[in-house]
């Protein structure tokens, strides 16, 4: 199940430095082959084989953060998620037509928090399997937050496609501190 948490305004306002990354995007992907790798047909093919932990195919760029920026993430999220270890799990820039194919992350269980940013309404989306249904959760202009659990007993198949540029920052939140 995907939840839409409310994250502090302090955290969102601290992400202003990403605007420069967004304003100077890498070149667009010329083809839309990502639509194939994020399709229900591709997912059904994967489901007929043993579950995978990582996506097989993606077209995205990694975003680098300074130690100061990482400290900001960890310290600010610790206020929202006390008694938890917080790890940066993915930090990507999806250029136009960028994508990440279906995957489960089942070898790294735990709570996930993903923040995505785009300057366009309904131009990118997060797909996930819920029962027999494929849910298309579209991004709105600005920041979209998603929180979900990864566990081996109930795999969460998911993928991403971006018709327009999109930033995504993910965190693993492990409730393990006393």
Image (cartoon, rainbow, N blue to C red):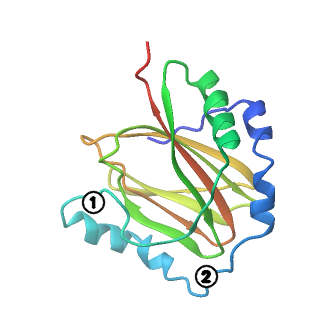
Residue in view at x 56 percent, y 43 percent = 146
Badge 1 or badge 2: first in the primary sequence: 2
Which numbered dot is residue 29?
2
**CA distance separating discs 1 and 2:** 25 Å
Residue in view at x 34 percent, y 73 percent = 42
- In this rendering, is residue 11 above or below 125? above
Q: Residue furthest front?
A: 67
Disc 1 element: loop
Q: How would you rate the neighbour count of disc 1 (Cα within 10 Å): few for under 14, some for 14-19, many for 20 or more?
A: some
Residue 134 in the image, given as x and y percentages of width and height = 42, 59
Return the residue at label 1. 52
> Splitting the image into 4 quarters, where does residue 123 fall?
bottom right
| 81 on left or right of 151 | right
Q: Quadrant of the N terminus?
A: top left
Residue 160 in the image, given as x and y percentages of width and height = 52, 63
Residue 29 in the image, given as x and y percentages of width and height = 61, 82
| 58 on left or right of 65 | left
Residue in view at x 63 percent, y 56 percent = 64
């Amino acid at each position: 199940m995907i939840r839409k948490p409310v994250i502090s305004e302090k955290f969102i306002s601290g992400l202003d430095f990403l605007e420069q990354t967004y304003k100077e995007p890498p070149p667009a992907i010329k083809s839309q082959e990502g639509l194939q790798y994020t399709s229900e047909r591709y997912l059904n093919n994967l489901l007929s084989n043993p579950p995978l932990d990582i996506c097989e195919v993606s077209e995205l760029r990694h975003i680098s953060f300074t130690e100061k920026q990482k400290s900001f993430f960890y310290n600010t999220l610790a206020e929202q998620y006390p008694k938890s270890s917080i790890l940066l799990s993915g930090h990507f820039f999806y250029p136009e037509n960028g994508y990440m194919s279906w995957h489960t992350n089942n070898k790294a269980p735990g709570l996930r928090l993903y923040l995505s940013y785009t300057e366009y309404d309904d131009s990118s989306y997060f797909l996930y399997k819920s029962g027999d249904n494929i849910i298309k959760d579209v991004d709105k202009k600005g920041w979209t937050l998603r929180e979900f659990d990864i566990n081996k007993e109930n795999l969460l198949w998911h993928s991403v496609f971006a018709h327009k540029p999109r930033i995504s920052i993910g965190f693993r939140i492990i409730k393990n501190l006393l």
